[in-house]
Every structure is written in C-alpha cells, then in structure tokens.
C-alpha cells in the first residue's frame, strides 16, 4: 500500500514540474469533489487506466517495502526537495552531473546537498572493491611516496614502476624517488605528475582517454605502478589501514574487498607466501577493528586472481590456493572470484572442472564472480552470467548484461542473487556514458536485488562509497526514488554480504542504531537551520580530503 501514498506525492511533483493541471483535478476528483470531476468525466476511464499503470510500477520499484516513520518522512521531504531542485535546474540547463564524465564533474558533485546528505548517511557495507584502488591517491603520494628506499623507473610503453628496496636490483634502471623529486623545480610539481601516474585524475582526461581501450590501458597502468609500491609489507599495512579509515569515515561499517593476492615483500626482497600475505591483511584489519570497535564492524577478503591465463592448470593452482587460504584464514576469506577484462579471459564454462571443486569436499569456498560486464551480447563472456549463477555465486560483479537474459534473470531472482553495481566505474571506464541510461535502471524499477559499490574509487578521485550512492540515487533510480530506496540499498548491502546469519544480524543492529542517530541529526539540522544542510557540518574528517 505504501506505493499509493507515494503516488499522490508523485502527482504533486509532476504537476508542478510539467504543469499538467489535470493531475490536480484528478486528485480533487478522488477526494470526491464531483463538480470538478464532471469536467473530465469523458476521459475518466483513460485517467483511471493510466493511474493503474503508474500505481503498479510504484509497487515494484526498489525500496517500496520500506515504511518510513514520522522522522524519516520529514527527512525524506527535505531530501526530495533538494533532489528535485537539482533535477529541475538541470532539466533546463542540460548540465546534469550524472550524465557527464565523473572525472570532469567530481568537484561539482561534492558541492550538492544530496551528496553531502549521502556522505553522512550510514550506508552499511561496501561489497565490490579492489585492493590497490581503495585509499585516496593523494594520500599515497603525500604519505607513502615520501618513505625512504622507494625507487622508480620507466619501462617500455611508458609504464612507471615503483618498488621499495634496500639495494636496487638490476631488473630496471632504478632512481630513488627522493632524488627524482629533488630534480624537479618543486616537490609539488613532481607530486602532481606522480598523482597522474597513479590515477586517472588529470587536467585533460577527455583528450587523454579518447576511447575505451585508451582508458583501460591507463587504468591498468596505474594499478601496476601502485601495486609495486604498496605490496611492500609495511606500506601495505599502512595502505590497508588508511583505506578502511576512509570507508569508516564515509559511514561504511563493513568492507568486502577483492585482490589478486600479490605476495608482499620485505625491504631485502624476501617475499612472503600467499598464506603469510593474507595473514598480514587479517592482522591489519583486526587492528583497525580493535581501534574502532564502536564505529566499524569488519573486513573480509575475496581472493580474485586474473582470469586471463593460457591454460587450465593455472586455474587449478588458483582453486587449490583458495582452499588453502580458506583453512588458514577461515573468518577472513569471504570467497573466490576471477578478475580482468572479461572479453579477454577464458569463459567460465571452459574451466568448469576446477571451479566445481570449490563447492566440493570438506573445505567449501563461496564464489562471487565478475560476470556480464560486457557489451557483447550472445558471445561467450556474456554467457558467463549463466555459469556464475549455476555455480551458486553469492553475488555477481557488475552483471548488467543480465537484462538481455530473461532466463538468467529469473534464475537470479529465484535464488536471490544480487548484482554488484558500480556506476562511476562503468562510466569512467567507458561502458556507459550517461548514467541515466544504465541498464540497471530497469532492474531497479522491477525491484531486482542490487547492491551499489565503488569498484576502484581512488583511481578516479572518489573517496569510498558516497559518490556511487549519489549516481545511483540521482541517475540509476530516477526521479521518484527517495529515502526508501537509499535505506533499501543499505539494508541490501548487509543482507547480501558474505557474512553468516549471526554476523548479519549483529551488523544490521549496528547499522540500525547509526541510521536512527542519523535521522535524528538530519531532522534537527533540516528543521533548525532554515531547511538546509549547514555547510559547516560535513562528515569529511581532517584525515581524508575528497579527491585530491
Ligand atoms: C638510467 O637512469 C639515469 C638517471 O635517470 C640516466 O641518466 C641513464 O641514461 C639511464 N640509463 C639507461 C640505460 O636508460
Ligand atoms: C600454463 O600457463 C602458465 C602461465 O600462465 C605457464 O607458466 C605454464 O607453463 C603453463 N603450463 C602448461 C602445461 O602449459
Ligand atoms: C548449487 O546449489 C544447489 C542447491 O543447494 C545444489 O543442488 C548444487 O549442487 C549447487 N551447485 C554447485 C555447483 O555448487
Ligand atoms: Zn571489479
């Protein structure tokens, strides 16, 4: 029934936006003023039918099951005023932020009231992230790149390599970063260039990245440079801790991130084994949790090696390692995935035997496959979606090609398998230009299960999760999505996390408390400060600046 109350609001909104006075007439008609009714009597069947169609859509759209209490309704009203003001202004100017490349409008997004609101909102869990693109690059540059013993060199294809070493090895023509920095006219100049090598944040992204291949190449190049530097064990400890801090400060309670699990190394070149490396991850995550027991819930890791291999024996190695990791860190390892450009990797059906063993035997490893992140309908990577579902994936990474597969879609619904949707990533990596045309919009209207995440936020200058919530709220979900949609997103992130039921319940309680406190605070702010978010009140802490 919630849908009908909302629908009246919608008519009011449409009414003022589109100038269609007939909605007001119909509302009066419903209220029983028959004199007014008579004026439109001849079309009344039409209006009724129209009303029925709209009402039926209002029942399915994501978030409709959420019932807002009085305080939430007051906050919702404020939020929707701001959202509609932003949409209305752009409707005529055509400068609508979610339709523009994120790299060009990030700072404008940060100025909006809706974004400020979303930053403060408790968002639950972030479930789709990659290890070396989680902490802001500006922090890495100002912090880790100033550590001693960091060397750099450039190899073929203008690829920057970074590595900590006691004594430089002979694999490359290494220069100390400190020497190189000193050779520049200023440290700022060097740092700005380094920032551009470790992220896609440049002055002229549109010229630099004319097409999808150019942007993917630059993206992969940033990850290579970053990985060499932060897989130095002490650097990784600092990096992971700082990344979790940025998520916590963005009001995220729980993080499930993926990685290829490159082996950590020491200054003398010794490499830790994969098992030892993961134990370091777990130790840092536990330290972070014990430092923030009331404002953070936990961290888990999805081992996600590269899908692009020559032969199946490498996949067997991956799977066997996943099983060993599950035994070494049973609480920390959430599961298994395969990553890298899907179109270039082996399709899941070709590596079925090793993948099937993940669900066999005593040690079972849950799976979270990236699948259906492709435009090639009907080609083998596109069918990965079906395999991911039949392999009992807990969630599907991206997966938006599912709109083209009614069978897979039904299977996902039957098994309640959500898609992990990462709007900013899809846009920056040139899979979808205008986020209002994201295929997931249709799924949201149908109430299909989704969670929203950030993929590689630091690569495009985002911090944690709020930017993707902004795009989901302002573009993917359309004008009518309100606080109930956002609340549902947060709830979904907990419901579809890889946690067991007891932990989910505990996390849900923790989130609910934060949510109630947030609503109370927002209600106070919006009623006592002339219905605006007090500009001095932001949750951006001193330690993490948005972007650079
Ligand atoms: C190695 O780096 C130094 C310092 O940057 C440079 O002068 C030299 O030409 C480089 N040598 C080669 C073989 O690239
Ligand atoms: C399989 O591929 C890996 C690299 O991906 C290679 O090291 C290995 O030798 C290959 N094995 C066989 C049997 O071809
Ligand atoms: C997936 O789950 C179903 C139902 O629990 C089970 O019958 C099937 O064997 C599982 N398949 C795999 C590959 O794990
Ligand atoms: Zn991803």
Image (cartoon, rainbow, N blue to C red):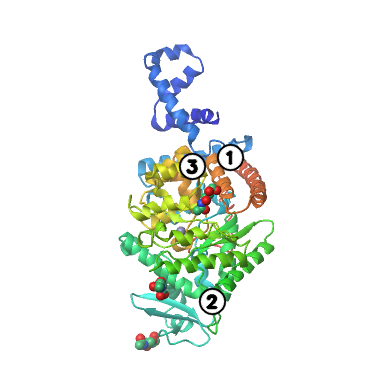
Per the image, the residue denoted by label 1 is 75
Distance from Cα at disc 1 to Cα at disc 2: 46 Å
Mark 1 or mark 3, which has the lower sequence index? 1
- The residue lying at 53 percent from left, 39 percent from top is 63
Pick the residue in front: 94 or 197.
197
Q: Regarding ligand 1, which quadrant of the image does it lie in?
A: bottom left
Per the image, the residue denoted by label 3 is 413
Q: Is residue 322 visible?
A: yes
Mark toward the viewer: 1 or 3: 3
Q: Residues within 10 Å of mark 2 (few under 14, many from 20)?
A: many
- The residue lying at 31 percent from left, 62 percent from top is 207
Q: Is residue 466 visible?
A: no
Pick the residue in front: 156 or 535.
156
Q: Secondary structure at mark 2?
A: loop
Pick the residue in front: 461 or 402.
402
The N terminus sits in image quarter: top right
Mark 1 or mark 2, which has the lower sequence index? 1
Q: Residues within 10 Å of mark 3 (few under 14, many from 20)?
A: some
| Residue 135 shown left or right of residue 216 in the figure | right
Rendering coords of residue 519 (x, y %): 62, 43
Per the image, the residue denoted by label 2 is 232
Q: Secondary structure at mark 3?
A: helix
Marks 1,3: beta carbons within 8 A: no
- The residue lying at 63 percent from left, 58 percent from top is 298
């Amino acid at each position: 029934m919630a849908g009908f109350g909302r629908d009246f609001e919608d008519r009011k909104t449409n009414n003022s936006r589109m100038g269609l006075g007939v909605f007001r007439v119909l509302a009066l008609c419903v209220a029983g003023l028959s004199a007014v009714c008579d004026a439109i009597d001849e079309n009344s069947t039409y209006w009724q039918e129209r009303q029925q169609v709209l009402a039926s859509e209002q029942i399915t759209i994501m978030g409709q099951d959420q019932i807002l209490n009085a305080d939430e309704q007051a906050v919702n009203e404020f939020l929707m005023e701001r959202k509609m003001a932003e949409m209305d202004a752009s409707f005529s100017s055509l400068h609508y932020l979610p339709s523009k490349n994120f790299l060009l409008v990030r700072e404008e997004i940060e100025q909006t009231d809706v974004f400020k609101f979303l930053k403060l909102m408790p968002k639950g869990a972030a479930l789709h992230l990659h290890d070396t693109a989680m902490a802001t690059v500006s922090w890495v540059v100002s912090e880790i790149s100033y550590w001693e013993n960091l060397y750099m060199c450039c190899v073929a294809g203008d690829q920057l390599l970074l590595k900590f070493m006691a004594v430089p090895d002979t694999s490359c023509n290494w220069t100390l970063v400190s020497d190189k920095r000193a050779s520049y006219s200023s440290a700022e100049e060097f740092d700005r260039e380094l920032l551009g090598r470790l992220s896609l944040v440049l002055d002229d992204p549109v010229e630099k990245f004319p097409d999808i291949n150019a942007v993917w190449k630059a993206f992969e190049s940033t990850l290579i440079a970053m990985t060499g530097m932060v897989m130095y064990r002490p650097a990784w400890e600092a990096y992971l801790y700082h990344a979790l801090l940025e998520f916590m400060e963005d009001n995220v309670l729980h993080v499930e991130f993926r990685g290829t699990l490159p082996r950590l190394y020491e200054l003398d070149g010794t490499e830790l084994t994969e098992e030892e490396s993961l134990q370091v991850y777990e130790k840092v995550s536990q330290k972070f949790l014990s430092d923030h027991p009331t404002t953070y819930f936990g961290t888990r890791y999805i081992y996600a090696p590269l899908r692009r291999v020559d032969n199946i024996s490498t996949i067997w190695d991956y799977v066997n390692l996943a099983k060993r990791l599950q035994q070494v860190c049973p609480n920390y390892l959430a599961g298994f995935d395969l990553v890298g450009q899907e179109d270039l990797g082996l399709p899941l059906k070709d590596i079925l035997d090793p993948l099937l063993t993940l669900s066999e035997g005593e040690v079972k490893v849950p799976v979270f496959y990236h699948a259906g992140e492709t435009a090639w309908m009907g080609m083998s990577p596109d069918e990965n979606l079906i395999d991911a579902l039949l392999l009992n994936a807990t969630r599907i990474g991206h997966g938006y090609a599912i709109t083209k597969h009614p069978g897979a879609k039904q299977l996902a619904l039957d098994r309640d398998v959500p898609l992990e949707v990462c709007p900013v990533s899809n846009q920056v990596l040139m899979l979808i230009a205008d986020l209002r045309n994201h295929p997931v919009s249709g799924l949201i209207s149908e109430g299909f299960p989704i969670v929203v995440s950030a993929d590689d936020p630091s690569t495009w200058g985002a911090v944690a999760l709020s930017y993707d919530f902004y795009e989901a709220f302002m573009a993917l979900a359309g004008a009518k999505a309100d606080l109930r949609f956002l609340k549902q997103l947060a709830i979904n992130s907990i419901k579809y996390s890889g946690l067991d039921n007891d932990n989910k319940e505990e996390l849900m309680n923790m989130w609910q408390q934060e949510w109630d406190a947030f609503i109370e605070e927002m209600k106070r702010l919006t009623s006592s400060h002339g219905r605006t978010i007090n500009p001095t009140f932001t949750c951006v802490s001193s330690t993490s600046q948005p972007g650079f």
